[in-house]
Image: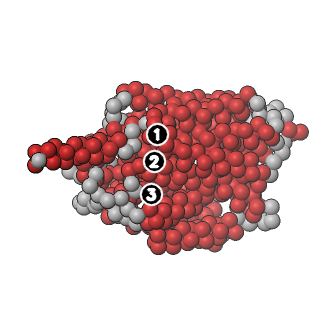
């Protein structure tokens, strides 16, 4: 497989694109990424309201969130691969079209089944982020790639907070879920128009035919795995249904690996999933996904808990949840832009370690001190610092070591394991919260929340350790210094020109 030095040779002579063009592309991708992230958290505060509206138990209503997660997990590697084959801009626009269509379906839904179907259509848009990272790598000058990836990655946290704020504002004026999705539809349309008008797709397209067998098997084992994880708490982790899903996932995964090793053009090159450098980037991504998705689920419940009833919480509203996360939005935007210069000095691996350490610190703060509003604000600000730095570096680390025509699927695989980590976070935290409740109620006890905070902090610290290990194993790797490979090539070319001039004289 072609490495980073070869890639640098192939691209060193290409003139840098005009800053104005790359600026428009970055704006379009950032806005589209924010719109996609909004849909991921839009429904979390609505779940209790949907239970009443459809007279359905929580196990059924939870599928409004799970369906989106499952669809995103399956669609991300597929659309990422298709982006490498047919063009990333086309696939980004397809993802946004499905987000728009799914939002309209949800907005007109009159039953829970239709709402879940619309949410599944919305979930396909999760593939937009890795496609955007691949487009940035194809389009931007080498010294701006990490910063640009950081800005787009930061939109995940910004959109997540914005989604909760929008839902909170609407929930304060109406009990209907329809207006929320009409707003999502309008945002999707705006993002679609902006990407169509401003984004540029200049990446190479190697051609070939899609690996349909690999796609079907990948969808099958991912679906079984995430179904088992999502239903573990409701059905019981040792129930026949959950164990059956896990067994089916293992069997289909084994068949998928065998197929991918034999086909000429596999959907996913296994080296991108478990290669020497890919494995550590993907492990860190899963651990960070665990931390980030846990934040969305844990903080919403904790802020809305009432001390008079359960002895903890901030007696907040749905809107308050989003407002408490505003510091995270600000610091994530600021520090994602600083991730590029930091990575240029110490390398993306150690930059990722720094960001992950901050993420662990914010959860450790809440585990120790959580009874005041300023505790939540401090947590939010530190979280933004951590994820702003970490996700920018992670996006770079996931794609730097692969050929240009594999950047989309490499980023897609990295996003896939992040979503899987988020699914595991939801299952683990839900199990802990359900297992420790306040006497005489069904509300989780304070100790359950604090245990979850410690577990999530440990996950982020472990991600930091994985990143440090990667940096120590590859101290001289070109992936540790963005732009260094190109600089060495320029130096070599200058040296050759000087020797040629001396011979001519």
Asked if the residue at tag 1 contacts the one at tag 2, i.e. Cβ–Cβ closer than 8 Å, the answer is: yes
Q: Quadrant of residue 173?
A: bottom right
Q: Nearer the viewer, residue 89 or 416?
A: 89
- The answer to which of marks 3 and 2 sits earlier in the sequence is 3
Task: Give coordinates of residue 267: x percent, y percent.
Answer: 31, 52
Most foreground residue, 491 or 231: 491
* Quarter residue 50 falls in: bottom right
Secondary structure found at label 2: helix
**The label number, if any, that marks residue 330 in the structure image:** none
Label 2 environment density (alpha carbons within 10 Å; few <14, some 14–19, many ≥20):
many
Say whether residue 202 is left or right of residue 392.
left
Residue 347 placement (x, y as % from top left): 43, 36
Residue identifier under label 2: 146
Q: Which residue lies under the disc numbered 3?
A: 132
Question: Label 1: which residue?
Answer: 343
- Between 93 and 31, the residue placed more toward the observer is 31
Residue positioned most to the left: 504
For this rendering, which residue is in front, 233 or 125? 125
């Amino acid at each position: 497989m072609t490495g980073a030095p070869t890639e640098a040779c192939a691209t060193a002579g290409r003139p840098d694109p005009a800053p104005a063009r790359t600026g428009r592309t970055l704006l379009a991708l950032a806005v589209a990424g924010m719109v996609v992230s909004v849909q991921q958290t839009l429904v979390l505060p609505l779940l209790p309201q949907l239970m009443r509206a459809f007279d359905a138990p929580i196990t059924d209503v939870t599928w409004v969130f799970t369906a989106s997660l499952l669809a995103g997990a399956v669609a991300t590697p597929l659309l990422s691969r298709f982006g490498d084959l047919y063009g990333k801009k086309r696939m980004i626009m397809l993802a946004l079209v499905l987000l728009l269509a799914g939002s309209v379906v949800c907005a007109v839904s009159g039953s829970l089944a239709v709402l879940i179907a619309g949410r599944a259509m919305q979930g396909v848009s999760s593939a937009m982020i890795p496609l955007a990272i691949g487009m940035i790598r194809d389009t931007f000058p080498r010294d701006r790639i990490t910063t640009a990836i950081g800005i787009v990655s930061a939109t995940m946290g910004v959109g997540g907070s914005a989604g909760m704020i929008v839902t909170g504002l609407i929930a304060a004026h109406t009990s209907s879920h329809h207006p929320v999705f009409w707003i999502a539809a309008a945002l999707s349309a705006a993002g679609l128009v902006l990407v169509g008008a401003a984004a540029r797709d200049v990446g190479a397209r190697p051609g070939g035919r899609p690996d349909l067998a690999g796609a079907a098997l990948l969808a099958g084992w991912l679906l079984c795995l995430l179904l088992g994880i999502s239903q573990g708490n409701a059905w019981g982790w040792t129930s026949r249904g959950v164990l059956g899903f896990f067994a089916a996932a293992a069997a289909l995964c084994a068949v998928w690996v065998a197929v991918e090793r034999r086909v000429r053009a596999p959907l996913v090159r296994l080296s991108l999933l478990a290669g020497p450098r890919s494995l550590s980037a993907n492990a860190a991504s899963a651990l960070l996904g665990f931390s980030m998705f846990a934040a969305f689920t844990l903080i919403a419940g904790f802020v809305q808990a009432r001390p008079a009833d359960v002895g903890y919480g901030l007696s907040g509203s749905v809107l308050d949840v989003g407002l408490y996360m505003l510091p995270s939005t600000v610091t994530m935007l600021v520090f994602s832009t600083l991730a590029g210069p930091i990575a240029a000095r110490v390398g993306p691996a150690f930059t990722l370690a720094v960001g992950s350490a901050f993420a662990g610190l914010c959860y450790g703060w809440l585990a120790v001190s959580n009874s005041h509003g300023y505790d939540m604000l401090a947590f939010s600000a530190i979280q933004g610092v951590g994820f702003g730095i970490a996700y920018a570096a992670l996006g770079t680390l996931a794609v730097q070591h692969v050929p240009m025509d594999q950047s989309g699927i490499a980023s897609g695989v990295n996003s896939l394991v992040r979503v899987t980590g988020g699914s595991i976070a939801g299952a683990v935290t839900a199990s802990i919260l359900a297992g420790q409740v306040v006497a005489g109620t069904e509300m989780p006890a304070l100790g359950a929340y604090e245990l979850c905070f410690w577990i999530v902090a440990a996950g982020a610290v472990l991600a930091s350790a994985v990143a440090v290990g990667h940096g120590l194993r590859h101290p001289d790797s070109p992936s540790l210094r963005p732009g260094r490979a190109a600089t060495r090539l320029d130096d070599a070319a200058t040296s050759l020109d000087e020797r040629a001039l001396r011979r001519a004289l």
